[in-house]
Amino acid sequence: MLGSETMAPAALHMQRPLAGQVAIVTGSTSGIGLGILEQMAAAGATVVMNGLGDISQIEDALTRIRTAHDIEAIYVPADLMEPKACVEMITATEQRFGKIDILVNNAGIQHVSPIESFPPEKWDAILALNLSSAFHAICASFAGMKARGHGRIINVASAHGLVASPFKSAYVAAKHGIIGLTKTVALEGAEFGVTANAICPGYVWTPLVEKQIDDQAKSHGISRDEVIKNILLAQQPNKRFAETSEIGALAVFLASDAAQSITGTALPVDGGWTAH
Ligand code: NAD
C-alpha cells in the first residue's frame, strides 16, 4: 500500500475525507458518541469531545485518538442540560478552531417507567438533553455554517424516533421531536450548503443500554437475560447489537462531500426493526 506522502491528492482525500474539517460530537466521552468521534478522527477531522466523565480517563482517550490518527483532539466540558452551556461549547470551539464544519448532537439519557409513575423531573431532563440541547447547539452554530456555505448537522435520534415502545414516553417524544427538528433545519440550510440528517440506531451495546437492562427487568419483573432476548433484541430482526463504529461510519459518510444531496432524512441503523 502507498504511504500517504506518496499518494495523489484525490486518493488521500478518499482515505481521509474529513481532513481540514472541525467536528464537534456531544456526549462523546462514552458509547456511540465516542464511536463517532473516533471514526471522524480516523477520517482526518479535528475533533472536539464533549460529555461527562473522569477527566484523567478523558485525557487518556484524547491522547490515544491523537496518536492513532495524527489529528488535533480537544475536550470542551459543558453540561448540556443548560442552554447557556450549549452556546458556550459552540463559542469555545469556534474561538479555538475558527469554524465548525460538523456538529453531531448525540448526548442523551434514558429513563424507563410506566407513564402513570413517570417522574416529571425525568421528563424535563430527557427533553432538555435529548432534544433542547440539540436546538441550542444548532442555533449557535448555524449562522457560521451558512456564512461559510458548508455545514453538516447530524442528530443521533433512535429507532424510537420512528416507532414507540412502552415505558419510554419522554425518550420517544424527544426522539420523534429531534427528527422534526432535523427536517426543519434541513429546509433552512439547503440553499446554503448545510445539511441536517438524523441517524436512528436500534440497539447498540453501550452504558446507556446496560443501565436500561436493569430498569426494564424491574419494570417487567423478569431477568436480565429475558430482557435482552425477549424485549431488546425481540425488536431487532438481525438479533445483534450494532457496534458504535457502525454508527460512526454512517456519520462520516453523512459528513463527507459524497452526501451533499442527502438532507432532511432519518436513517435507520436498526437491523430491520422499523421495517416491521
Ligand atoms: P452513553 O450513556 O454511553 O453516552 C451518553 C453520553 O452523553 C456520554 O458521553 C455522557 O457523558 C453524555 N452526557 C450525559 N449527560 C450529559 C450532559 N448533561 N451534558 C453533556 N453530556 C452528557 O449512551 P449511548 O448509548 O452512547 O447514547 C448516545 C446517544 O445515542 C443518545 O442520544 C441515545 O439516545 C442514542 N441511542 C442509543 C442507542 C443504544 O442502543 N445505545 C440506540 C438508539 C439511540
Image (tube, rainbow, N blue to C red):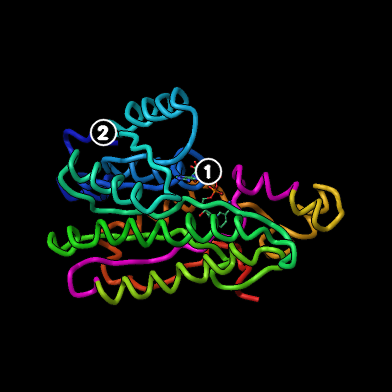
In the picture, measured across the screen, residue 154 lies left or right of residue 229, that is left
**Occupied quadrant, residue 66:** top left
Mark 2 lies on a secondary structure that is loop
Q: For the residue with label 2, is its CB less than 8 Å from the closest atom of ligand 1?
A: no
Residue 134: horizontal and vertical position, in percent? 39, 59
Q: CA distance from mark 2 to mark 1?
A: 21 Å
Q: Which residue is mark 1?
A: 31
**Span colored in magenta:** 189-214
Q: Which residue is mark 2?
A: 72
Residue 44: horizontal and vertical position, in percent? 27, 42
Q: Identify which amino acid the numbered label 2 is placed on.
A: Glu
Asked whether 19 or 195 is in front, the reply is: 195
In the picture, measured across the screen, residue 3 lies left or right of residue 228, that is left
Mark 1 lies on a secondary structure that is helix
Quarter in which the C terminus is drawn: bottom right
On residue 261, which mark appears?
none
193 within the magenta span: yes
Q: For the residue with label 1, is its CB less than 8 Å from the closest atom of ligand 1?
A: yes
Q: Identify which amino acid the numbered label 1 is placed on.
A: Gly
Residue in the image at 62% along x and 60% along y: 120
In the picture, measured across the screen, residue 129 lies left or right of residue 95, that is right
In the picture, measured across the screen, residue 261 lies left or right of residue 147, that is right
| Mark 2 or mark 1: whose residue is earlier in sequence | 1
Residue 219: horizontal and vertical position, in percent? 80, 56
